[in-house]
Image: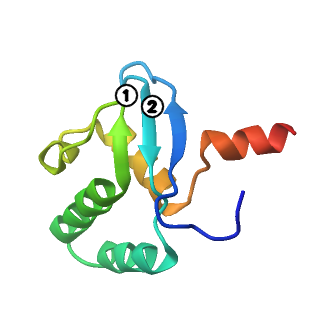
Amino acid sequence: MNLFIDDGYTATKTIEAVPGLHPAASIVYRPALHSRKRLWQHAAGSSAEAQAKADVEVIAEHVVSINGQPLPKEKVGKLWPALTAKILDLVLGYAGSDEEAADAKN
């Protein structure tokens, strides 16, 4: 794993299904840079509407695909809430990718 997030870098995470909350999903995403993460955090201190908008924007900007399909911005707000939270954690660096889990085993 490189110290820097280079342009075009993507990571992958398979999120296991949680019965009653969301189905399984394979996510390909570009990790957010620190400056983007700070902008998202700033939105967290504003209204619920602004936070929801910030969540949609950061996911739309950084998710390359879900289950091999592009994720249109207009569909982001329709993701299962628990899955949305896990995707945000990935993009914003609060959770690791499958690559990081594989590195830990070596």
* Classed neighbour count for the residue bearing mark 1: other residues with Cα under 10 Å, few (<14), some (14–19), many (≥20): few
Compared to 36, does 106 lie above or below?
above
Q: Earlier in the sequence, mark 2 or mark 1?
A: 2
* Classed neighbour count for the residue bearing mark 2: other residues with Cα under 10 Å, few (<14), some (14–19), many (≥20): some
Q: Quadrant of the C terminus?
A: top right
Q: Position of residue 27 (x, y in %)?
A: 43, 38
Of residues 73 and 21, the one drawn nearer to the viewer in this rendering: 73
93 displayed left or right of 72: right
Quarter-of-image position of residue 41:
bottom left
At horizontal 35% and vertical 40% (from top left) the residue drawn is 65
At horizontal 24% and vertical 62% (from top left) the residue drawn is 57
Q: How many numbered badges does the structure rendering display?
A: 2
Residue found farthest to the top: 19
Q: Quadrant of the N terminus?
A: bottom right
Residue found farthest to the left: 74
Q: Which mark is residue 26?
A: 2
Q: Position of residue 6 (x, y in %)?
A: 55, 67
Q: Which mark is residue 67?
A: 1
Residue found farthest to the right: 106
102 displayed left or right of 50: right
84 displayed left or right of 7: left
Q: How far apart are labels 2 and 1 at the CA level?
A: 5 Å
* Residue type, mark 2 in image: Ser
Q: Which mark is residue 41?
A: none
* Residue type, mark 1 in image: Asn
Tags 2 and 1 touching, CB below 8 Å: yes
SS type, badge 1: loop
Compared to 62, does 34 lie above or below?
below
Q: Position of residue 76 (x, y in %)?
A: 22, 46
Compared to 43, does 72 lie above or below?
above
Q: Position of residue 54 (x, y in %)?
A: 26, 66
